[in-house]
Amino acid sequence: MWDRLRGSRAAGGGRSAAAMAQRDEKVPAAAAGESEPGAGAGRGQSGAAAPFQPPEGGFGWVVVFAAAWCNGSIFGIHNSFGILYMMLQSDLGEGRRIRRSTWVGSLAMGMIFFCSPIVSIFTDRIGCRTTAAMGATIAFIGLLSSSFTKSLEVRYFTYGILFGCGSSFAFQPSLVILGHYFKRRLGLANGIVAGGSCLISVPLPFFLKMVGGAIGLAHTFQVLSALMLIQIFLSMTYRPILTPSCDSQHDGHDKLGSRSVRRQCWAQTRKYFNLRVFRRKTYRIWAFGIATAVLGYLVPYMNLVKYVEKRFQETKKDWILLVCLGAMSGLGRLISGRIGDCIPGLKKIYLQVASFMLLGLLCMMIPQCRGFEGVIVICLFLGLCDGFFTTIMAPIAFELVGPMQASQAIGYLMGLMAVPMTAGTPIAGYLNDYFGNYDAAFYFAGVPPIIGGLVLSVVPLVHQRMLKKQRLDSGKDKMLVSEAVVNGELLPGCPASEAHM
């Protein structure tokens, strides 16, 4: 179509070769400026913008392996803090300091979510590979330095701050980079990453329990730092293939040059703290629903073992609950990744709706169990719900905002999740102290996921309504433009007035 249109213009005469060349340069630039994000990466030889097409495999499977190692090692260490907490208790020996040592693990887990908006900025500006390698290096330094001190205050910084921030910087790029290599199989890739990570995170607590007592806490930190050392080299595989358009970068520099210093500073601030994702109504509803649902999300995971010990006096087999949660979570991630690929568009959100609704009901059923075996059955389904919710989150972000803004969308979402996830467990602890049992805590934990699931169910409906309105508006525009189009064709971004020239 581009060659035919250019030939028809040349046949019209009246323009010099230089003017024709200048016009041909402007048209592709305008087309690239109004195309979808990432379209500049798929231009053909003629200069026309084409949609970006991921390779759907190839080197992407190496990236999947690196991302699986990242997820497994980071969350395996964080989920195993219960073992490290017992070793911290033996080192401290003072009651007050023992209670304060719980903040070491809580601070590290909270930093993963609190740092996410900042990580998204680094990911957009310096790339997934550099951000992930930098994060793995910080996490490695945090774990290694924790082995050279016995001060609780110093470990607040080395383990809680350094390792927590490094984990956030290393983890989030592993979600974003998959969108560079997969689109049709993105759900499957996320499922393999999440499920493969369980091969590390599930056996790690048992490994620490067996080895930690023999080698001590200091050497245990050194062993764990080796996992982050390996992740530094695996992060080098995060080779981006989806880059922003060069024309848009040059245009941005030209615009900055013509502005005042004050406006340049404001423009740079808006560029780094990009809030454009919140302009999308569907993203705002989705982020609010997720943040609401996770208020009670961690309550059963943090209190199940204590509940079983107190309710059923079961202390020898309580580890089975953790195995069931981890194993079924891995299975759920694999299954949900494949199912997500078969569900078109934003209808994937209904998987999250079902998982949150079921998770809320299961939490409320825990106090109704009359035996330890009943709690095991509930843990199997809880792990399945966890797998479905975790895996489908990144593909939904790509569907909502596109690949170029997915990093910002995931970062802001995890930042919004930080406060409710951190607050849920203390609220459950207060309810336990007030009523003297865990029943009220589990009933409380079941309400937010149900409310969040109901909110999420609205997103596809709002999206369909917005698409319908957009089609009606575009149909009216086509009727107005069709009268000014030469031969019934017009390049994207080409003004109608030039079509007659």
Image (tube, helix red, strand yellow):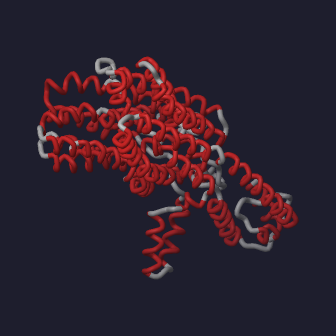
- Residue 310 locus on image (x, y percent): 33, 27
- Residue 203 locus on image (x, y percent): 32, 23
Splitting the image into 4 quarters, where does residue 222 fall?
A: top left
Q: Residue at x 72, y 72 (%)?
A: 16
User: Is residue 46 visible to us here?
Assistant: yes
Q: Give the residue at the far front of this rendering.
A: 435
- Residue 85 locus on image (x, y percent): 23, 36
Q: Residue at x 52, y 34 (%)?
A: 359
Q: Residue at x 36, y 45 (%)?
A: 430
Question: Vertically, is 246 above or below 437?
Answer: below
Question: Vertically, is 456 above or below 343?
Answer: below
Nearer to the camera, 227 or 368:
368
Q: Residue at x 34, y 44 (%)?
A: 109
Nearer to the camera, 184 or 172:
172
User: Is residue 170 visible to us here?
Assistant: no
In this image, 70 relative to 263: left or right? left
Splitting the image into 4 quarters, where does residue 491 fall?
A: bottom right
Q: State the quadrant of the C terminus.
A: bottom right
Give the total number of marks visible in the rendering: 0
Q: Give the residue at the far right of this rendering.
A: 483
Nearer to the camera, 493 or 161:
161
Question: Vertically, is 457 above or below 366?
Answer: below
Nearer to the camera, 246 or 136:
136
